[in-house]
Image (cartoon, rainbow, N blue to C red):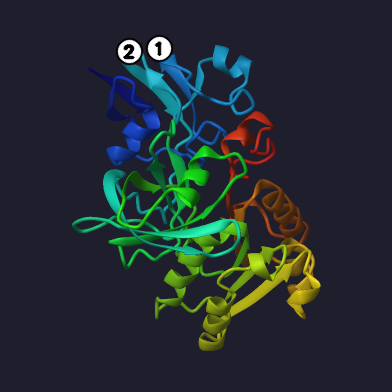
């Protein structure tokens, strides 16, 4: 059984299977709806049901308040129809969004590498033509014995669609990431779907680019930077700020140092906030957003900024960028949150549409 959902103000119509979320159905039918986390935490995919009935699902009470629920608001990533629907969405499609259709895949684990004591790289092989995606997007993994999908950003470039690499941090107490670190083996297969997300380079905007990344949040910027540097027509300057506690947690440092040597337009600035004596560190000491402030002397206007990492890092970076005269339209981000984050606070600012 399926239901017909009409999306206003565009008038587009999608078919949603029983038990399927509106967002999943839209993405699989090539229909654009705004979304970010895809897991009921951020509130970006909020829509209003104008006609018909729909279940709320697992929406965070902070992303969808009780008053909003009573007024017919739902999160498209959690909402499942109980009848045909008419919904209203904040449809403001980005002209740089390619809109690759979400598909299901059975991927084979081709290799694994320990990047830091807590982060592992997993290389996956996709069948046939592989996945079409934009640099910066993510996939959802279905893991044995784990309820619900887990999202991980793609660290490799779209020009190699048959092989993708994921950088996965072991979350303390996390069933999914613990299984990946301790039980996953080369040769096993994993079910995944993708691509998802609206974290990608706005190539139509010629402004120079700033990337700020922390922890496994380096994965999306790595894909985006490699994609930009691989385009001979692209001339914008790129600066990557990578934050870690110490050198043991600062992975792919040599890769980016080599890229900086080989590309005049690329600058790499690593920052350690708690270097050890044995690190013999002579680089920037402090948090990654502080490194960005120091490098640009607190003035960020004339740039596009892409932020990826834990929520506290993202919030600090946003404050620093806005104090340096960079505004909402030029700041894009992807917060790396765990399932527990949605129960702690609303991770989306009430002051801005996208931040």
Q: Quadrant of the C terminus?
A: top right
The residue tagged 2 is: 83
* Secondary structure type for disc 2: loop
Q: Nearer the viewer, residue 121 or 289?
A: 121
> At 51% across and 16% down in the image, what residue appears?
72
Instruction: Give the percent coordinates (x, y) of residue 158.
Output: 35, 63
**Residue 327 screen position, x and y as percent:** 67, 55
- Residue at coordinates 72% horizontally, 69% vertically from top-left? 271
Q: Could you tell which of marks 1 and 2 lies nearer the N-terminus?
A: 1
Task: For residue 299, say whether it is visible.
Answer: no
201 or 12, nearer to the observer: 201
Please say if 33 is above or below 137. above
At 59% from the left and 63% from the top, the residue drawn is 116
Secondary structure beneath label 1: loop
Answer above or below: position of 118 versus 347.
Answer: below
The front one of 317 and 119 is 119
Residue that badge 1 annotates: 53
From mark 1 to mark 2, how far is it between C-alphas? 6 Å
Q: Are marks 1 and 2 in contact (CB under 8 Å)?
A: yes
In the image, taking residue 184 as reference, residue 171 lies left or right, namely right
Instruction: Name the residue: 73% across, 62% down.
Output: 289
Neighbours of disc 2 within 10 Å: few (<14), some (14-19), many (20+): some
């Amino acid at each position: 059984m399926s239901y017909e959902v009409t999306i206003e103000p565009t008038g587009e119509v999608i078919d949603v299977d029983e038990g399927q979320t509106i967002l999943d159905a839209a993405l699989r039918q090539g229909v654009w709806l705004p979304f970010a986390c895809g897991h009921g935490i951020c509130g970006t995919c909020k829509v209003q049901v104008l006609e018909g009935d729909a279940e709320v699902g697992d929406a965070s009470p902070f992303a969808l308040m009780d008053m909003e629920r009573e007024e017919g608001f739902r999160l498209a990533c959690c909402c499942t129809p109980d009848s045909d629907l008419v919904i209203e969405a904040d449809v403001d499609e980005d002209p740089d969004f390619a809109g690759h259709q979400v598909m299901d895949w059975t991927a084979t684990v081709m290799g694994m590498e320990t990047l830091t004591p807590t982060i592992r790289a997993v290389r996956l092989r996709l069948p046939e033509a592989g996945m079409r995606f934009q640099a910066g997007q993510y996939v959802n993994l279905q893991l044995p014995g784990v309820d619900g999908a887990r999202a991980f950003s793609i660290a490799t470039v779209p020009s190699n669609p048959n092989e993708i690499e994921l950088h996965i941090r072991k979350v303390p107490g996390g069933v999914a990431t613990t299984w990946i670190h301790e039980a996953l083996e080369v040769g096993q297969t994993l079910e995944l779907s993708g691509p998802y997300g609206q974290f990608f380079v706005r190539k139509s905007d010629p402004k120079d680019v700033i990337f700020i990344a922390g922890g496994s949040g380096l994965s999306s910027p790595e894909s985006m930077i490699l994609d930009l540097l691989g385009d001979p027509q692209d001339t914008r300057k790129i600066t990557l700020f990578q934050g870690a506690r110490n050198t043991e947690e600062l992975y792919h440092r040599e890769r980016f140092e080599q890229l900086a040597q080989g590309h005049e337009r690329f600058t790499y600035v690593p920052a350690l906030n708690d270097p050890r004596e044995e690190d013999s560190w002579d680089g920037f000491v402090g948090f990654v957003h502080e490194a960005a402030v120091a490098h640009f002397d607190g003035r960020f206007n004339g740039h596009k900024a892409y932020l990826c990492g834990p929520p506290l890092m993202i919030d600090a970076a946003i404050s620093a960028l806005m104090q340096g005269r960079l505004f909402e339209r030029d700041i894009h981000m992807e917060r790396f949150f765990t399932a527990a984050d949605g129960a702690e606070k609303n991770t989306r600012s009430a002051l801005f549409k996208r931040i």
